Image (cartoon, rainbow, N blue to C red):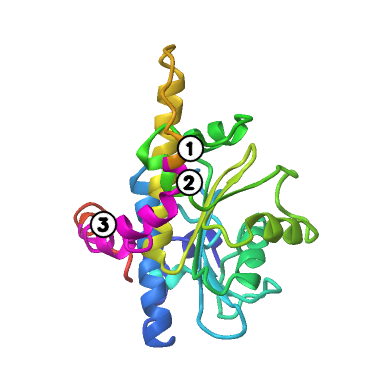
C-alpha cells in the first residue's frame, strides 16, 4: 500500500458509525482544533500535537496521525492510543513519539485534563527561552499567570523517565511553558484548552513586541496579579472556551471545511 496515499483525507474511511457518539464528537472537535491551530499559523509542519482523552478508566486518548498536515486532519484520521502507545483501531498511521510521551504523561495523572495542546510557535519558544519567562505586562498575561508552570528542557521528549518530572512540574496548573521548547495548555474541554492556548500565545506575542520597543515598561502591580484567579473565573466563566467555540467553528466552516469527516 502506498503510505503517502493513505495520508490523504479522502482516502480515509469514516469512523462515524464505528465509535460511540461521545468519541465521535471528541474526534470532530479535536480535528477542528488542529485546523484552527493551522488557521492561526501556530502549526510547525507536522511536529506539534493536540490530544483529547476518551472518557473511562483506561486513559486512552486521541492524537494526530504523524505526517498529516494540521489543515487536513479529519475526525476519522485521528489515532486512538492507550497508555503504552498501542494503536487501538486499525490505522496505517504512526504517531509522534515525543507527542506520545508528553500527552500520555499528562492524561495519566490529570483526569480533569480532557484536552492537552502543545505548540512550537515563534513567540512561544522565544518567551520560553527568556530567563524570566512570562511577564505581567498585559491583561492577556494575567490569565496564564493565574495557573502557570514551567518545565526545564531535557532534549526531545522521548525518555520514559521524563514523564514523572513533567507531571510534577505541571501539578494542577492549566498552562505550562516548556523551556526552550514551547507552550502547553490543558482544559476540561477542547474549547477551553484552545482558548487557553490563544490567550497564552497572545500574551507571548505582546511581551515580545513590548520588549522590542526600547522604552521603559509598566508592569502590572503585584496586587492585581495576586487577585487574578478570582477575576479570571468571573470574566471567562472558567476558561470560557465554549463561549468562543461556536464562532470559531463557523469561521472554520467558511475557510477550511471538511474536518468532521
- Indicate the quadrant where residue 89 lies: bottom right
State yes or no: residue 109 in magenta: no
Prevailing secondary structure of the magenta residues: helix
Q: Which mark is residue 42?
A: none
Whether residue 153 is situated above or below residue 102 in the rendered picture: above
Mark 3 and mark 2: span between their CA atoms? 31 Å
Please give the label number shown on residue 226: 2
For label 1, the residue is 222
Instruction: Tell which circle, 3 or 2, labels the residue nearer the N-terminal end.
Output: 2
In the rendered image, residue 171, in percent from the top left (x then y), is placed at: 64, 60
State the residue at coordinates (62%, 75%).
Answer: 87
C-beta proximity under 8 Å, tags 1 and 2: yes
* Label 3 vs label 2, nearer the camera: 2
Look at the picture and state if 225 lies above or below 172.
above
Q: Nearer the viewer, residue 41 or 227?
A: 227
In which quadrant of the rendered image does the C terminus lie? bottom left
Q: Of residues 60 and 256, which is closer to you in this image?
A: 60
Instruction: Looking at this view, name the residue that lies furthest to the front.
Output: 223
- Name the secondary structure under disc 2: helix
Query: Which segment did they paint magenta?
Result: 224-250
Amino acid at each position: 500500500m502506498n503510505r503517502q496515499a493513505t495520508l490523504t483525507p479522502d482516502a480515509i474511511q469514516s469512523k462515524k458509525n464505528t465509535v460511540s457518539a461521545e468519541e465521535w464528537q471528541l474526534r470532530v472537535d479535536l480535528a477542528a482544533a488542529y485546523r484552527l491551530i493551522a488557521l492561526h499559523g501556530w502549526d510547525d509542519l507536522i511536529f506539534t500535537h493536540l490530544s483529547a482523552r476518551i472518557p473511562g478508566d483506561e486513559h486512552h486518548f486521541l492524537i494526530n496521525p504523524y505526517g498529516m498536515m494540521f489543515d487536513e486532519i479529519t475526525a476519522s484520521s485521528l489515532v486512538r492510543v492507550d497508555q503504552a502507545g498501542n494503536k487501538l483501531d486499525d490505522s496505517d498511521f504512526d504517531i509522534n513519539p515525543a507527542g506520545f510521551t508528553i500527552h500520555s504523561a499528562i492524561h495519566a495523572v490529570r483526569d480533569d485534563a480532557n484536552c492537552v495542546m502543545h505548540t512550537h510557535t515563534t513567540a512561544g519558544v522565544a518567551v520560553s527561552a527568556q530567563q524570566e519567562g512570562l511577564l505581567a505586562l498585559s491583561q492577556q498575561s494575567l490569565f496564564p499567570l493565574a495557573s502557570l508552570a514551567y518545565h526545564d528542557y531535557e532534549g526531545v521528549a522521548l525518555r520514559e523517565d521524563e514523564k514523572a518530572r513533567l507531571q510534577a512540574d505541571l501539578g494542577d496548573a492549566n498552562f505550562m511553558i516548556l523551556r526552550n521548547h514551547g507552550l502547553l495548555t490543558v482544559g476540561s474541554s477542547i474549547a477551553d484548552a484552545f482558548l487557553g492556548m490563544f490567550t497564552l500565545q497572545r500574551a507571548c506575542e505582546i511581551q515580545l513586541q513590548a520588549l522590542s520597543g526600547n522604552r521603559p515598561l509598566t508592569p502590572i502591580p503585584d496586587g492585581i496579579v495576586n487577585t487574578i484567579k478570582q477575576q479570571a473565573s468571573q470574566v471567562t466563566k472558567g476558561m470560557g472556551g465554549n463561549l468562543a467555540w461556536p464562532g470559531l467553528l463557523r469561521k472554520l466552516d467558511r475557510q477550511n471545511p471538511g474536518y468532521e469527516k
